[in-house]
Amino acid sequence: MPPTETAVDWSRLWSDPSMLRLRRDRRSFFTVAWSVFAVAFCALVGFAAFAPEIIATRPVPGLSVGLILSLAYVATVMSLGAWYVRRARHWDILAAAVLSVPAIREREVAGNV
């Protein structure tokens, strides 16, 4: 093993309460985010495929329902991206807590000396 790599007790790391919280938070976020994305995408594509007459309707001259749905989809994706960035900052704190466990930190320091 190269001197910069350290042996990690993965079973201990994966059972650490901080790691369990990090995994739970990420899993719940991605479940919700993926569901929102999938519903928005399927609604947009579904309307375009199965209800083109609704998509072609122009509630305002020069603005179709398809354009409105497309803009709503883009806004949804951008909102999910912003939400991800906000949650990722929180996950960075949780990941730092996992690495701050004394046994893990000692191994990290010993391996980098």
Image (cartoon, rainbow, N blue to C red):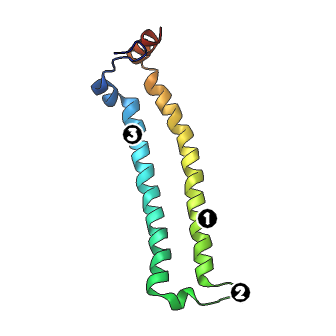
Residue furthest toward the right? 61
Question: Would residue 68 appear left or right of 15 to someone viewing this image?
Answer: right
- Look at mark 2 in the image and give the residue it sits on: 62
2 vs 3, front mark:
2
Q: Is residue 53 above or below residue 43?
A: below
- Decide which of 9, 49 is in the foreground and name it: 49
- Look at mark 3 in the image and give the residue it sits on: 23
Tell me the quarter of the image containing the N terminus: top left
Q: CA distance from mark 2 to mark 3?
A: 47 Å
* SS under mark 3: helix
Number of labels in the image equals: 3
Q: Is residue 46 above or below residue 23?
A: below
Residue placed at 45% from the left, 83% from the top? 49
Residue placed at 58% from the left, 45% from the top? 86
- Look at mark 1 in the image and give the residue it sits on: 75
- Decide which of 28, 106 is in the foreground and name it: 106
